[in-house]
Image (cartoon, rainbow, N blue to C red):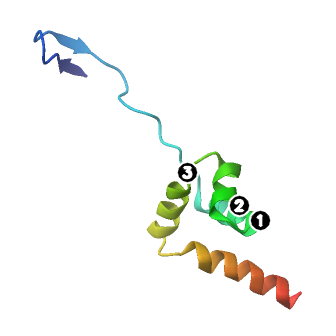
Amino acid sequence: MFVKCPNCGHEVQVRGLGRKRLDVGLNKVLDALKGQRSVVAAAKELKCSPGYIFNVLKSQKLKAQDVIDQKNAERDIC
């Protein structure tokens, strides 16, 4: 891809703009949330931001509190 310099007008070839995608799967996010019972702790475990976890859950129409509460309900049954 070629980008034109705004100062001098030269065209410069660039490769791969930006950061690579993190691509942490939904199952990994759910497992981390169930194990850690906290979004911040799960984010540290997965080495991502809490916002990334919220966005992954939002894309599947889930809420973090529902996933955490589900784990607590399973624990009460056993």
Residue type, numbered disc 2? Ala
Answer whether labels 3 and 2 touch (C-beta < 8 Å). no
Which label sits on residue 49? 3
Residue type, numbered disc 3? Ser
Which is more toward the observer, 11 or 76?
76
The image shows residue 23, relative to residue 69, as above or below, that is: above
Viewed as shown, does residue 71 lie left or right of 77? left
Q: Is the residue marked by circle 2 packed among few (<14), some (14-19), or many (20+) residues within 10 Å?
A: many
Instruction: Compute the Cα span from label 1 to label 3.
Output: 17 Å
Which label sits on residue 35? 1
Q: Nearer the viewer, mark 1 or mark 3?
A: 3
Mark 3 vs 2, N-terminal side? 2
Q: Helix, strand, or loop for circle 3?
A: loop
Q: Position of residue 70 (x, y in %)?
A: 69, 82
Residue to which mark 2 is pinned: 32
Which residue is the extreme one toward the left?
9
Q: Position of residue 12 (x, y in %)?
A: 23, 12
The residue depicted at 37 percent of the width and 26 percent of the height is 16
The image shows residue 62, relative to residue 45, as above or below, that is: below
